[in-house]
Image: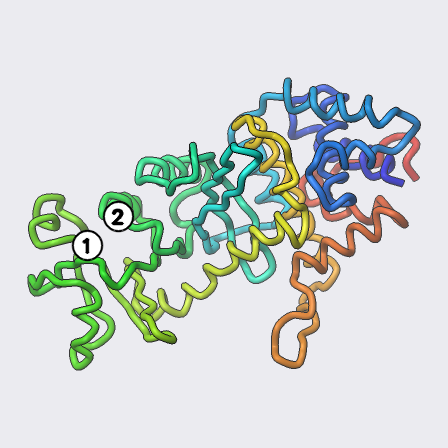
């Protein structure tokens, strides 16, 4: 059954990828195998290959794929956008995910698209060690995005407290990128009327409102670096404040910021709830980046399959309001089931990439 799915997907992707027939088949075998096996581990994927080939031979074939295939940094981005059917503008979320392989730290900085149905990584980079990203890394990631799409495609960029910095926000403002970034209560700001204090101290002045304008940093820092004047919006949570700085309307930023959690759900889909990304034994940065591209395609496939399956409906909800199964798991489980019973139906969603693709010879 999987042989039919691999052949059909190879036929669909052939116009878009400059790979030999063998390499392209291997790529499709990996994407389909990681969904079928719920793992990115090459040993597990080797067991998913249909036919009479020895598992050890398939394992070596997979190793050679990661060893010898060199694709452009953002080769999967056009495929992802067409598969998801993205148009006009969308939300972006920025975050990190990291884990250890032995003593090696794997640390991805990920920029993901977030919609009602989809949460899929678009561009990413690897950070050396286990630390946070710096301003230069974030700017480089956004420049890669802007090299493929205009800033008008970004409805709002969402990021957590790790992703602050006057230089970073100045870059976003200069490039007309709308953003809502959470900040800590002890961050020093300079208010529009020139007062230099922490956000916590400013919010104690409740009578002066919870939405105001300010620059990041002390009065001297703000004057020296010419940091932009931003909107600050806050609301109380249990024992703390949710504070976001933004260059859009404060109310819009606060209401939309809650969707940032979708990227945390995305990491769960890529890991324990779906593809078990942490199962990989790859440690070379280039190979890890290639693997993330394949994982992104599998995640987009699951989301697209759920959207095609449900149409305008939403997944059923439990009594307390949450989905019984997420969009991802709805599509993911559907694909895994159909791969075993009707493989051509399982890969039907990929026709969005190349609607003119025809079935390969011998596939019925």
Instruction: Name the one closer to the observer, 303 or 267.
Output: 267
Percent of width and height locating residue 150: 41, 43
- As drawn, which residue projects farthest toward the front? 103
Image-based side of 362 in relation to 110, left or right: right
Instruction: Name the one closer to the observer, 16 or 185.
Output: 185
For numbered disc 2, what is the local secondary structure?
loop
Image-based side of 178 in relation to 209, left or right: right
Image-based side of 200 in relation to 91, left or right: left
Q: Residue 296 is drawn in which quadrant?
A: top right
| Image marks 2 and 1: residues in contact by CB distance under 8 Å | yes
On residue 216, the disc is: 1
Q: Earlier in the sequence, mark 2 or mark 1?
A: 2
Position of the N terminus, as image quadrant, is top right
Q: Residue at x 49, y 60 (%)?
A: 261
Disc 2/disc 1 C-alpha distance (Å): 8 Å
- Residue 318 higher or lower than 326, as above or below: below
Q: Residue 147 is drawn in which quadrant?
A: top left
Percent of width and height locating residue 364: 92, 40
Image-based side of 152 in relation to 18, left or right: left
How packed mark 2 is, by other alpha carbons closer than 10 Å (few <14, some 14-19, many 20 or more), is: some
For numbered disc 1, what is the local secondary structure?
strand
- Residue 157 higher or lower than 343, as above or below: below
Q: Residue at x 26, y 48 (%)?
A: 165
On residue 165, the disc is: 2
Percent of width and height locating residue 286: 54, 26
Q: Residue at x 17, y 63 (%)?
A: 198
Percent of width and height locating residue 205: 16, 76
């Amino acid at each position: 059954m999987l042989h039919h799915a691999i052949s059909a997907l190879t036929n669909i992707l052939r116009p878009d990828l400059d790979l030999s027939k063998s390499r392209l088949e291997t790529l499709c075998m990996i994407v389909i195998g990681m969904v079928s096996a719920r793992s990115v581990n090459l040993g597990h994927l080797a067991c998913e290959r249909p036919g009479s080939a020895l598992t050890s031979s398939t394992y070596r074939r997979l190793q050679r794929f990661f060893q010898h295939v060199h694709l452009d940094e953002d080769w999967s981005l056009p495929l992802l956008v067409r598969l998801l059917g993205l148009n006009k503008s969308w939300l972006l979320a920025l975050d990190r995910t990291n884990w250890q392989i032995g003593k090696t730290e794997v640390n991805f900085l990920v920029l993901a698209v977030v919609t009602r149905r989809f949460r899929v990584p678009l561009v990413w980079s690897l950070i050396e060690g286990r630390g946070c990203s710096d301003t230069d890394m974030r700017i480089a990631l956004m420049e890669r995005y802007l090299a493929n799409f205009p800033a008008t495609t970004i409805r709002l960029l969402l990021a957590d407290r790790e992703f602050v910095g006057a230089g970073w926000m100045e870059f976003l403002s200069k490039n007309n990128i709308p953003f809502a970034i959470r900040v800590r209560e002890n961050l020093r700001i300079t208010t529009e009327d020139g007062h230099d204090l922490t956000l916590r101290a400013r919010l104690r002045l409740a009578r002066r409102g919870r939405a105001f304008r300010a620059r990041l940093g002390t009065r001297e820092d703000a004057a020296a670096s010419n940091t932009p004047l931003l909107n600050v919006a806050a609301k109380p949570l249990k024992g703390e404040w949710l504070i976001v700085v933004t260059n859009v309307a404060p109310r819009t930023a606060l209401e939309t910021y809650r969707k940032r959690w979708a990227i945390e759900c995305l990491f769960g889909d890529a890991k324990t709830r779906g593809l078990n990304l942490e199962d990989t034994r790859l440690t070379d940065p280039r190979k890890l980046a290639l693997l993330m591209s394949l994982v992104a395609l599998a995640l987009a496939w699951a989301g697209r399959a759920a959207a095609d399956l449900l149409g305008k409906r939403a997944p059923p909800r439990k009594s307390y309001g949450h989905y019984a199964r997420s969009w991802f798991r709805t599509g993911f489980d559907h694909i895994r089931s159909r791969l075993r019973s009707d493989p051509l139906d399982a890969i039907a969603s990929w026709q969005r990439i190349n609607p003119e693709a025809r079935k390969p010879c011998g596939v019925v």
